[in-house]
Amino acid sequence: MTVPYHGDVANVSLGSWMKLVFRWRGSVWKSVLTELLIWLGCYYVTMFIYRSDLVLSHRGQESFERLVAHVNARVSRIPLTFMLGFFVSQVVDRWRQVLLNMGYIENAALTAASLVRGNDERTRIIRRSMVRYLVLSQVLVFRDIAISVRRRFPTMRSIVQAGFLQDHELEMLEKVKLDDNYNKYWVPINWACALCFKLRDISQPNQDPNVHGLMHVSHMNYLLNEFKFFRNNLQTLCNFDWVPIPLAYPQVVFLSVRVYFLICIVGRQFIVGQDSPNRTQIDLYFPMMTVLEFIFFVGWMRVAEALLNPFGEDDDDFECNFLIDKNIATGLAIVDAYDEHPVLNMDQFKTQQGPIYSEESQKHGHHQNVLVGSVAQVNLAKPDDDVKMVELQPLSAAPSTESVPTFAQSFMSNLRPRKKTREFSLRPAHRVRSHSTNFAPVSPNPTESPKYSFCSPTASIGMSRYPSQVSRYHSSTEGPFDISFAPSVLANDVVHEVDLEEEDVSLGRSKHFKPHHIASRISEVSEEDQSPVAEEKFALSLEKISERGSVEQLKKEK
């Protein structure tokens, strides 16, 4: 009973939407017409009561006008769009899952026809019985969840008369000792699995599997998996039928829509009182905007009602009877065509120069539609161009010391290092605290002078745009230290310290001299800018910083 319409919208045109709008079967007009007529009848009855002097007095009409203003101002507080949208999305998702698990016999039938080998009558009956048992299980399930299938098979005897079940099989099905509250959908599939087990390869002598219908164990497992997949689909349908959406949810949605438009019968009346402060500017006898709103919202709700249980007899419900007939006919045809294939000849594509189209299709230019990548037609180089390829330098390579000016290294040799181990990282313009310690020693000999060096960090320090670190050895001796920089690191950046021991100036703690101040100055001097003026400015900066460090040290000693 599904309504097909894809053919009407195959080609987008100016009037293609009209082919959908002006259809009756399964349309929104058919679903809302009855309720719309009832609503319009109530609306006009209310209008007659309001405007008739025989029913309401002048004072009563004024009270009704105040009621209209009050109701119309507050009816928008009902979140109709939110509730309908969320509910319809949930219902459509369940409908899609049901559609995907309807159960189609083709995969199981093709597997049985390929793996159950044999030309004898017994093997042929086994293949057909496997398909029939699977479809019989589907009939038993649909008979309990779809009213259309229930009408077709009202009793078990009707299933026997239709050919899906035989008399002796019905007796075996009825002899299965099980409570009446429990279903027996699994019994036919159990019969199909038993037939599959009987065909397993038991290595009998003088028996050809292609003649006697034997099956290898691995083939049997593959066929059993197809049977299980078909049964899982039927079980999913049962689950959706047994456990619907909680009742309170559709109750709230359906009630809210109808209450909303019940209130609109009063709230959307046109006020015609001469002394009314909310008098309507235009007096219309037909509430056009409210009717459109009714069609949209109620039609939206009726879609959810139709999809809530797609196993009914509505226009858009699933064709369960057709699916049963299709499965039994297709499955039996597949297993009967065992080991059949055409005579093999060379195909014409070996000598054919290009694809063949009909003359009508060629006129419409269908052969010109090609699928290529979005940048496949972009030419960045000619085919004959010699493109030079270079090797990418690894990020973990040791940095070079060539980028540090020589005059800066001479000033740095006179500085005294601090005894605390610190970490530094390059930051664009802000200070960042780090909680990871990563040392990069320069010399393996701890008796040498302590040194500082910039090095590439590990993967744990990856927040900086130009990551680097400074660390030094602990040593009891105090001496000069060295700093090395990578050229690509110091370009237009400032080195900011990441100190593990926080020093809060606001708490009154002193701010000591730190080597990263020197590194900041060095980062501002490039290899090209080594003029005497730059050397003099740099020397003055170092002297100021050194004097400040000495004063702070004296204060600390006192």
Image (spheres, rainbow, N blue to C red):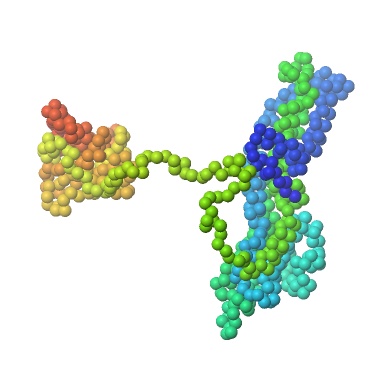
Q: Position of residue 438 (x, y in %)?
A: 26, 48
Q: Nearer the viewer, residue 505 or 50?
A: 50
Looking at the rendered image, the quarter that the C terminus falls into is top left
Q: Residue at 12% x, 52% y: name it.
A: 447
Task: Judge left or right: residue 68 versus residue 534.
Answer: right
Task: Judge left or right: residue 117 versus residue 552.
Answer: right
Q: Residue at 73% x, 29% y: name it.
A: 290
Task: Judge left or right: residue 407 versus residue 289.
Answer: left
Q: Residue at 77% x, 50% y: name it.
A: 313
Residue 182 lies in quadrant: bottom right
Task: Judge left or right: residue 297 versus residue 480.
Answer: right
Residue furthest to the bottom: 205
Q: Is residue 113 above or below residue 255?
A: below
Q: Nearer the viewer, residue 410 or 245?
A: 410
Q: Position of residue 454 (x, y in %)?
A: 22, 44
Q: Position of residue 397 (x, y in %)?
A: 24, 48
Q: How many marks?
A: 0
Q: Nearer the viewer, residue 189 or 378?
A: 378
Residue 158 lies in quadrant: bottom right
Residue furthest to the right: 54
Residue furthest to the top: 275
Note whether residue 393 is visible.
yes
Q: Position of residue 389 (x, y in %)?
A: 29, 46
Note whether residue 144 is visible.
no
Q: Residue at 66% x, 59% y: name it.
A: 103
